Amino acid sequence: MKTQQPATATQGTSFAKGLSVLGAILDHDGIRADEVAETVGLPLSSVYRFLRSLRDAGFVTDDEGIYQAGRRLAGHGSGLPSTNISTVAAPFLEHLAAVTGETAVLTVRHGLHAVCVSQVESAHQIRLAFELGQLLPLYAGAGQRVLLAFAPDDVQRAVLQGDIRARTPNTPTRGELGRVLARIRADGYALSRGELYAASIAIAMPVLKGGLAVAGVCVAGPQNRCGVAWRDAARRELAAAVHSMTATLGDAATHHAPDMT
């Protein structure tokens, strides 16, 4: 009589391997299949099989052979009330898009990534826009980097010690990033030029609670429309919007707090 291995044992082994593949992707800001195979010690053919399943389920994305965490993981990691923040931010994003003429974006941090949770796109035919739910590196782009500059120390260390992949020639290097973050904390805002998308410019400020960023508010557009005068005006509008958002979030928290007296 032939003895058959219990299905649960086989599934458990396969499940553990699949988790190791997913874990390798979460530990890197973009990784190739062969690098995953080397990291987890699995044959490349097996890694591709797991990657196909993870991609089809929405847990990873494949951008020309570079694998990253997918949108189904964007709602996990930081416990931030992104839905409430999006609701509060909506009129401010509308105002920012109207007065600056460019796309206004709200980002929040989830683990070691940023995610775009809301945006109001520019009315211009040529404009910058993000994919809602898109996971973005914390180190590249103004709206993401303000989250990193005002993140807990362990998050900053993990990013500074982790993989930093150049998205464009303007993406800060590991050696530059620490100085850039210090400048953001001193200035209270971040500015980026073509770090994620070529010929783009963005300026962002954090919404802070207890000294930590709960969200980043950003306006972004093409460089040929966003000169020095635009940046100065956008920075003033951002400061006013973030101040009002912070006050609104504080009032909402106070309004909903239970009476403990």
Image: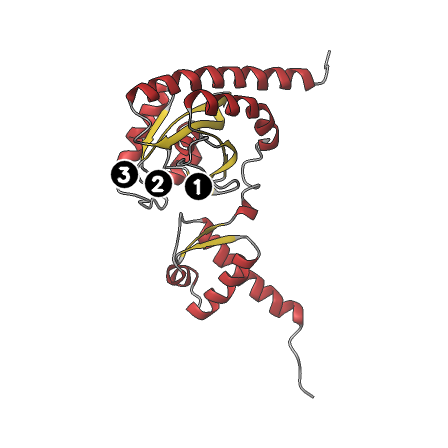
Query: In which quadrant is the N terminus drawn?
Result: bottom right
Callout 2, which amino acid? Answer: Tyr
In the image: residue 96, left or right of residue 249: left
159 left or right, relative to 15? left
Q: Where is residue 104 in the image (x, y as percent from the top left)?
A: 46, 28
Q: Distance between the residues labelled 3 and 1?
A: 16 Å
In the rendering, at what x and y percent does residue 218 appear? 43, 28
Real-space Cα separation, disc 2 to disc 1, in angstroms:
12 Å
Q: What element carries label 1?
A: strand
Identity of the residue drawn at 36% across and 26% down = 190
Give me the residue at 28% from left, 39% from top.
173
**Label 1 near label 2: C-beta < 8 Å?**
no
The residue under the point 54% across, 43% down is 74
Q: Which residue lies furthest to the top in this view?
A: 261
- Relative height, residue 62 to residue 169 (above, below): below
User: On the image, which quarter does residue 75 sit in?
Assistant: top right
Residue that badge 1 annotates: 136
Residue 170 is labelled as 3
The mark nearer the N terminus, 2 or 3, is: 3
Q: How crowded is mark 3: few (under 14 residues within 10 Å), some or many (20 or more)?
A: some
Relative side of 9 to 77, left or right: right
Q: Which amino acid type corresponds to the residue marked 3 in the rendered image?
A: Asn
Q: Distance between the residues labelled 2 and 3?
A: 10 Å
Residue 225 horizontal/vertical position (percent): 33, 28
Assess whether mark 3 and mark 2 are in contact (beta carbons under 8 angstroms): no
* Residue type at numbered disc 1: Leu
- Which of disc 1 and disc 2 is earlier in sequence? 1
Q: Mark 2 points at which residue?
A: 197
Residue 16 in view in this figure: yes
Which one is closest to the eye, mark 2 or mark 3?
2
